[in-house]
Image: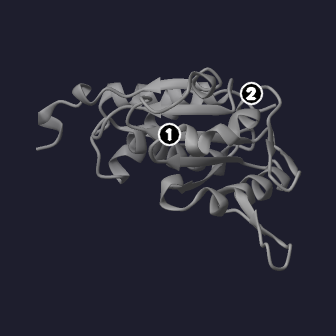
């Protein structure tokens, strides 16, 4: 099993924030710590908070830092991340659909990513980030994936088991449209936009 973050991770995180042209404020460095620790415990996470709260920067900096550490430490796994906006395409395009003419199955963007990542060798962490509003129209289909079953059930009766090295993350402004069933299945990390001092932007 892989060990927890090494003692020099703060140094790598600070360099990662600087490489993103962001100030490594202690509150955001600690959020990157929090994100990593949460991924060790849960496979479904929600990064919640308004714009300028540091949601995107936290996972980008953590990815850069962990990939740098993994180069010199065989006990650490690198992180590969794919992100998408689930509201930019239709639900059939997201999960897959039947062609009524040919009776053939066309794979969806999200279901294809989950299958590909889960079937890959667990040599690195693979995170799928859904960056967009969370509502019951599309995320209810993921409830069986986010609970202890860790299985995505598609309309063609295919069942895709989530790999232990794969994490589902949702980057959202708020949870006003999310159902209690979905919220209860995910770990929550709150990013408060008011924590970003105006002097850090100037």
Q: Residue at x 39, y 44 (%)?
A: 57
Say which mark, if any, is on residue 147: 2
> How far apart in space, not on screen, are marks 1 and 2 (Cα)?
17 Å
Quadrant placement of the N terminus: top right
Quadrant placement of the C terminus: top left
Return the residue at label 1.
134
Marker count (numbered): 2
Front-lying residue, 34 or 186:
186
Q: How is the image coloured?
A: one colour
Residue 92 at x, y percent in the picture? 66, 60
Q: Residue at x 41, y 44 (%)?
A: 56
Compared across the picture, whether 74 is left or right of 127 comes to right
Q: Residue at x 65, y 24 (%)?
A: 185
Please identify the residue farthest to the front as the structure is shown.
Answer: 100
Give SS at disc 1: loop
Image: 41 above or below 68: above
Compared across the picture, whether 16 is left or right of 68 comes to left
Front-lying residue, 174 or 57:
174
Residue 116 at x, y percent in the picture? 78, 59
Disc 2 crowd, CA 10 A, few/some/many (<14, 14-19, 20+): some
Q: Quadrant of residue 54?
A: top left
Residue 44 at x, y percent in the picture? 64, 33
Please identify the residue farthest to the bottom as the structure is shown.
Answer: 102
Contact check, label 1 and label 2, Cβ < 8 Å: no
- Kindly tell me whether residue 162 is visible in this rendering: no
Q: Quadrant of residue 111?
A: bottom right
Disc 1 crowd, CA 10 A, few/some/many (<14, 14-19, 20+): many
Compared across the picture, whether 26 is left or right of 150 comes to left
């Amino acid at each position: 099993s892989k060990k927890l973050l090494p003692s020099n991770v703060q140094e790598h995180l600070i360099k990662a924030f600087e490489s993103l042209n962001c100030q490594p404020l202690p509150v955001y460095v600690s959020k990157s710590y929090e994100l990593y620790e949460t991924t060790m415990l849960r496979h479904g996470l929600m990064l919640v908070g308004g714009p300028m709260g540091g949601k995107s920067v936290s996972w980008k900096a953590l990815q850069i830092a962990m990939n740098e550490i993994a180069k010199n430490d065989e006990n650490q796994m690198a992180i590969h991340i794919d992100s998408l906006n689930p509201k930019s395409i239709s639900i059939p395009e997201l999960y897959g659909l039947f062609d009524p003419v040919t009776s053939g199955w066309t794979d969806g963007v999200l279901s294809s990513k989950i299958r590909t990542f889960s079937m890959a060798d667990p040599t690195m962490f693979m995170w799928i980030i859904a960056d967009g509003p969370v509502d019951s129209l599309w995320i209810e289909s993921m409830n069986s994936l986010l609970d202890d079953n860790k299985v995505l059930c598609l309309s063609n009766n295919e069942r895709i088991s989530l790999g232990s090295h794969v994490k589902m993350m949702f980057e959202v402004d708020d949870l006003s449209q999310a159902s209690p069933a979905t919220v209860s299945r995910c770990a929550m990390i709150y990013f408060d936009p008011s924590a970003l001092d105006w002097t850090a932007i100037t």
